[in-house]
Image (cartoon, rainbow, N blue to C red):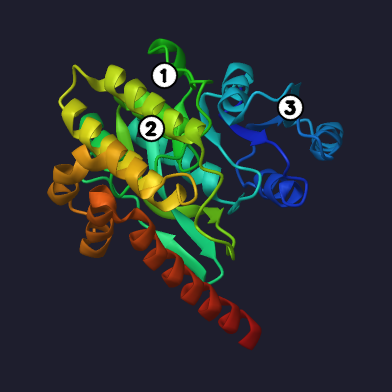
Amino acid sequence: MSPKISIIVPIYRAEKTLRRCVDSLLQQDLEDFEVVLVDDGSPDRCGEICDDYAQKDRRVKVIHQENGGVAAARQAGIDAAQGEYTIHADPDDWVDPGMLSALYRKAEEENTDMVICDYWLNTYQGQKRVTQRPSSLDHFMVIRDLFGPLMGSTCNKLVRRACYERYGVRFPEDISYCEDLYVSVALLRNPLRVAYLPEAFYHYERPLNTHSLSRNYTDKSYRQDLRLNALFHDLLKDTPVGSFVDEKRQYDTLANAFFNGYGYFSASVFRHTFSSSLPLVWRSCHPLPERILLSLSCLGAYPVARGFVELAMKVKHMIARSSKSSN
């Protein structure tokens, strides 16, 4: 007999936090569930840890595969899942014991295809509950919210597994981030029955990053954003939210380049690439300081504008370190 819920965990280089994650999943007060651990070719001890859990607990299923990225790992988990519903968990996060039972009860009571709940954000500043109430339960309105106040993650969404097959939804394996947002949107493009549960169970951990905001932004990063834009455009072009998402993705591409492209974009290249986005910046509803900095960058002052952000982050990190040391 199939379990009620399959929990899918894509795993890569997570041996320090994996046990905490899996232990929290196995401590659920719902009895009928399975945990699908997908070892995505992790070079550390994650594979051994997964096998150890599978040997000790019949609810644990392990998949070992060559490294293909998080999207491929999530898809492998969906393909192997047997549950009536599915949900995902990342190996550096953890969940509260009542998560599965509460989500499943809500899904059964309202006969829904997707249940969205709140989550906990855990940072160096402590724990904060993040509300995820959609502005409407209409599936197209939920899509709009996913490009605004709602998190696109599949970790706070219980989904009827049959919806993946019924609507031909798969994780796009040629992108390395926002794959969960894409799948959430691809599912909601169809007439899913959506419910909201105003409770938080999932702990999303964001450790303090003491380095610059700049990550390893490269030409590949920019091309990934353009690829995502094309995927979302093709997915939603004939829907009521298509033009809204096109514009939102264009803004997000600009913001990603601004915050993460320091050291990659020169002032002239940034202006050449994004100057056409200037009207879009001022049509947006983002905070005024951010729009000012983006506008300056589009006009050719990217290093100066980005320098202000670096300074602000250094001050923030100094305060954070001071707060941690005093505790």
Pick whichever of labels 2 and 1 is earlier in the sequence: 2
Q: Which residue is mark 2?
A: 114
How far apart in space, not on screen, are marks 2 and 3 (Cα)?
24 Å
Label 3 residue SS = strand
In the image, is 193 to the left or to the right of 315? left
Q: Which residue is mark 3?
A: 61
| Residue 90: % across, % down | 60, 42
Label 1 residue SS = helix
Label 2 residue SS = strand
Question: At x 41% / y 19%, what residue is drawn?
Answer: 163
Question: At x 48% / y 58%, what residue is drawn?
Answer: 120
Pick whichever of labels 3 and 1 is earlier in the sequence: 3
Kindly give the residue lying farthest to the front in the view shown. Answer: 268
Which of the pair 120/303 is nearer the observer?
303
What type is the residue that disc 3 sits on?
Lys
How far apart in space, not on screen, are marks 3 and 1 (Cα)?
22 Å
Q: Which mark is residue 163?
A: 1
- Place residue 207 in its image quadrant: bottom right
Label 2–label 1 contact, CB within 8 A: yes
